[in-house]
C-alpha cells in the first residue's frame, strides 16, 4: 500500500476507536506504516536505520505524556508485558536469574525523563548477549568490554 492508503486506513480505524497493525516486511512499507501512525508493527524484517528512528519516535514518552501511564508502567509494558503477549514470560521480560536479558543503561532518571530512551547520545551501554554493543561504553576495547559480562 502507498502512504495515502495506509494513512486513510489508520484515520478510519482511529475514528472508530480501533487499532491498526502493520504487517510489513519491506523497508518502504515499514516507513509508510510508521509515518501513517500505525499502532503496532509486525515483522519489520528489512528495517533500515531511518525506519528504526521512526519507530523509536513517539513511542515510550507518548504513553507518559498522552496516555497518562507512569514511566515505570511504560517500562514494564515494554518488557514484561511484551513477553507475556508472546507467551514467553519464563524466558525473558524481566531481569531474573535464568532469563535472557538485553539491557540498556541510560544517563537519566527515567521516572522524570522517560524521553531519554529516544536520545541515543544518552545511552551509556546497550548490552546484548553479555557484551556492550552500543552506547558510550561501546568504544571500550574488546578486552575491557568482556569484563562487563
Image (cartoon, rainbow, N blue to C red):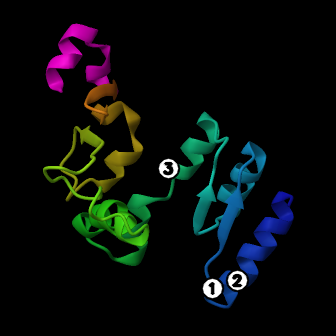
Residue 21 percent coordinates (x, y): 64, 70
Give the side of residue 35 with respect to residue 89, left or right.
right
In the rendered structure, which segment of residues is drawn in magenta? 134-149
Task: Determine which residue is flagged by label 3.
Answer: 56
Q: Which residue is mark 2?
A: 13
Q: Is residue 25 visible from the viewing direction of this image? A: yes
Q: Quadrant of the rendered structure where residue 89 is?
A: bottom left
User: Quarter-wise, where is residue 12 in the image?
Assistant: bottom right
Which mark sits nearer the N-terminus, 2 or 1?
2
Kindly report the distance in space between the C-alpha atoms of the residues bearing marks 2 and 3. 22 Å
Q: Relative to 95, does residue 133 appear above or below in the rendering?
A: above
Q: Quadrant of the C terminus?
A: top left
The mark nearer the N terminus, 3 or 1, is: 1
- The residue tagged 1 is 18
Secondary element type, mark 2: helix
**Lateral position of residue 100 relative to residue 109, left or right:** right
Precedes in sequence: disc 2 or disc 3: 2
In three-dimensional space, the C-alpha distance between marks 2 and 1, rounded to whole angstroms, equals 5 Å
Front one among 20 and 71? 20
How far from the left and from the top, in percent, is residue 71? 26, 64
On screen, 97 above or below 146? below
Instruction: Tell me the crowding category of disc 3: few under 14, some 14 to 19, or many 20 or more residues within 10 angstroms, Cα based.
Output: some
> Marks 2 and 1: CB-CB under 8 Å?
yes
Nearer to the camera, 112 or 10: 10
Cα distance, mark 3 to mark 1?
22 Å
Element type where label 3 sits in the image? helix
Amino acid at each position: 500500500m502507498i502512504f495515502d492508503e495506509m494513512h486513510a486506513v489508520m484515520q478510519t480505524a482511529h475514528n472508530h476507536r480501533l487499532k491498526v497493525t502493520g504487517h510489513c516486511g519491506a523497508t518502504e512499507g515499514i516507513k509508510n506504516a510508521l509515518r501513517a501512525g500505525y499502532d503496532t508493527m509486525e515483522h519489520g524484517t528489512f528495517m533500515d536505520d531511518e525506519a528504526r528512528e521512526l519507530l523509536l519516535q513517539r513511542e515510550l514518552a507518548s504513553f507518559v505524556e498522552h496516555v497518562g501511564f507512569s514511566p515505570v508502567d511504560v517500562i514494564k509494558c515494554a518488557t514484561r508485558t511484551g513477553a507475556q503477549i508472546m507467551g514467553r514470560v519464563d524466558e525473558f521480560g524481566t531481569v531474573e536469574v535464568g532469563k535472557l536479558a538485553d539491557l540498556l543503561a541510560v544517563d537519566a532518571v527515567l521516572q522524570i525523563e522517560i524521553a531519554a530512551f529516544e536520545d541515543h547520545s544518552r545511552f551509556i551501554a546497550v548490552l546484548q548477549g553479555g557484551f556492550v554493543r552500543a552506547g558510550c561504553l561501546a568504544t571500550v576495547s574488546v578486552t575491557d568490554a568482556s569484563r562487563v559480562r
